[in-house]
Amino acid sequence: MRGALAGNAGPVGNALLNVNGDATSRRVINSVSVNFTPIRQNAGSFVERGEYAAFWGTRYATDRFGTGDKRGWSNLFGGDFKFDIVNVADIGLTGTVRLGGSWDNVAYAVGSLLTVARFTNAHITIGYNIIGFEDRDFELARYSHSGPFLTFKMKLNQTSLLGYKF
């Protein structure tokens, strides 16, 4: 991008930069998710009825506007805690924190979830974040906006479509 200057949000759209010089933006982004469902011999225990998930995302960004440079790491940490209420539904809590720069820029998202799994290897989650934030780099991996949200997840692997002919 060449010629970027700080601008104002207009009545249509949110273009905060007007190009009129040199500008460069580069990002390196990676993330990992881990889910854990404990299984014990004494089925029905409170711990076994839960599912615990952790998320970590990291990003290194460099931005140049004219002669000014901005660069640094941001990290996103999240966790979900869900408990079975019936065989096909879970309720739970979700939380996300983003730590930017030198750990002085902090944003939070906290909410509740209802997950329904009426299909094999797929589920729908309905949730509501009481507080939240926007992050364009991680929003597809982890919902952090404030307000209601709906997600659909499906497990696919090398054996998922074995019985189908294409």
Image (cartoon, rainbow, N blue to C red):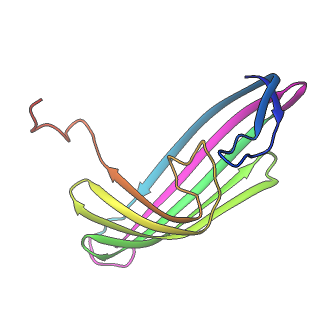
Q: Is residue 91 left or right of residue 116?
A: right
Query: What secondary structure do most residues of the magenta stretch adopt?
Result: strand
| Residue at position x 80%, y 44% in the image | 8
Coordinates of residue 6 in the picture (x, y in percent): 83, 37
> For the magenta stretch, what is the residue range?
41-69
Residue 112 in view, yes or no = yes
Q: Nearer the viewer, residue 124 or 162?
A: 124
Coordinates of residue 150 in the picture (x, y in percent): 42, 60
Q: As displayed, is residue 164 above or below residue 85?
A: above
Q: Is residue 41 left or right of residue 111?
A: left
Q: As displayed, is residue 3 above or below residue 146?
A: above
| Residue at position x 30%, y 47% in the image | 155
Q: Nearer the viewer, residue 82 or 65?
A: 65
| Figure quadrant of residue 136 | top right
| Residue at position x 77%, y 36% in the image | 17
| Figure quadrant of residue 132 | bottom right
| Residue at position x 50%, y 47% in the image | 141
Residue 14 in the magenta stretch? The answer is no
Q: As displayed, is residue 15 above or below residue 148?
A: above
Coordinates of residue 44 in the picture (x, y in percent): 28, 78
